[in-house]
């Protein structure tokens, strides 16, 4: 009986991310970081994802839950999700610290060519976070985003590019994918009429 409940929770958890909202928010966050880097506004980019977090839950309650309902997950599932979230936060803080360090290094007049390997690390860390998120939350699209970030990181290192390019490319891909999925979800899932039940 217990394994059936866990199996049901896992299936609900996987399906709960099919609306595309997480893709849209993650993509916009990474895209804003990349754009801020591109236009030499790195400090603004570092706070952009934090500004999106308070909007996430109210928007989910307003757009998604009226169409799907709400499920309270068991303690094991919540613990697993909390650990995954903590890992992603650590990776995010590490990416931010690395990005600010590279920015300060380059702003000090040191040519970026000397740190080409380091320039690819932000995209690689974001790709690792996407891989962990995809595995933890059962989102099959996130490993594809991770691949885009990893390829972008490799290209940044091999071609001596700026760190912003793979972040903008991967962020734009995730945001566009999320927008398409969210549009389809809203079209295909009308608001549940509780009075009719």
Image: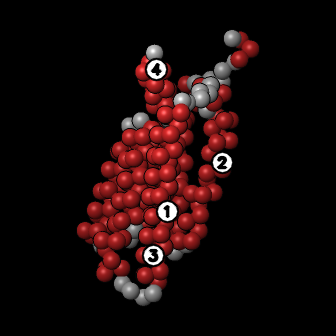
Q: Which residue occupies 57% across, 71% down? A: 43
Question: Residue 74: x, y in percent?
Answer: 54, 30
Q: Name the residue under label 2.
A: 55
Name the residue: 42% across, 21% down.
3
Residue at the right extreme of this rendering: 195
Tell me, for residue 93, which label it has, or none: 1
Q: Is residue 89 left or right of residue 158?
A: right
Is residue 178 in view? no
Q: In this view, does 195 lie to the left or right of 41?
A: right
In the rendered picture of this protein, how many numbered marks are placed on residues? 4
Q: Is residue 20 above or below residue 43?
A: above
Question: SS of the residue at dot 1?
Answer: helix
Quadrant of the rendered image containing residue 68? top right
Q: Where is residue 72 in the image (x, y as percent from the top left)?
A: 59, 29
Whole-Å distance between the Cαs marked 4 and 2?
35 Å
| Viewer-nearest of discs 3 and 2 | 3
């Amino acid at each position: 009986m217990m394994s059936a409940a866990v199996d049901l929770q896992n299936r609900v958890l996987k399906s709960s991310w099919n609306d595309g909202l997480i893709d849209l928010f993650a993509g916009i966050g990474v895209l804003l970081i990349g754009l801020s880097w591109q236009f030499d506004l790195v400090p603004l980019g570092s706070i952009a994802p934090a500004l999106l977090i308070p909007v996430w839950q109210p928007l989910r309650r307003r757009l998604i839950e009226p169409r799907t309902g709400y499920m309270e997950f068991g303690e094991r599932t919540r613990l697993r999700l909390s650990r995954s979230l903590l890992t992603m936060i650590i990776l995010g803080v590490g990416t931010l610290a690395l990005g600010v360090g590279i920015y300060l290094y380059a702003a000090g007049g040191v040519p970026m060519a000397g740190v080409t390997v380091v320039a690819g690390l932000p995209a690689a860390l974001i790709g690792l976070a996407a891989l962990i998120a995809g595995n933890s939350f059962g989102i099959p699209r996130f490993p594809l985003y991770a691949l885009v970030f990893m390829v972008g990181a490799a290209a940044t290192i091999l071609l001596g590019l700026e760190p912003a390019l793979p972040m903008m490319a991967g962020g734009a891909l995730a945001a566009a994918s999320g927008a398409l999925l969210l549009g389809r979800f809203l079209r295909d899932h009308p608001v549940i009429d509780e009075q009719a039940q």
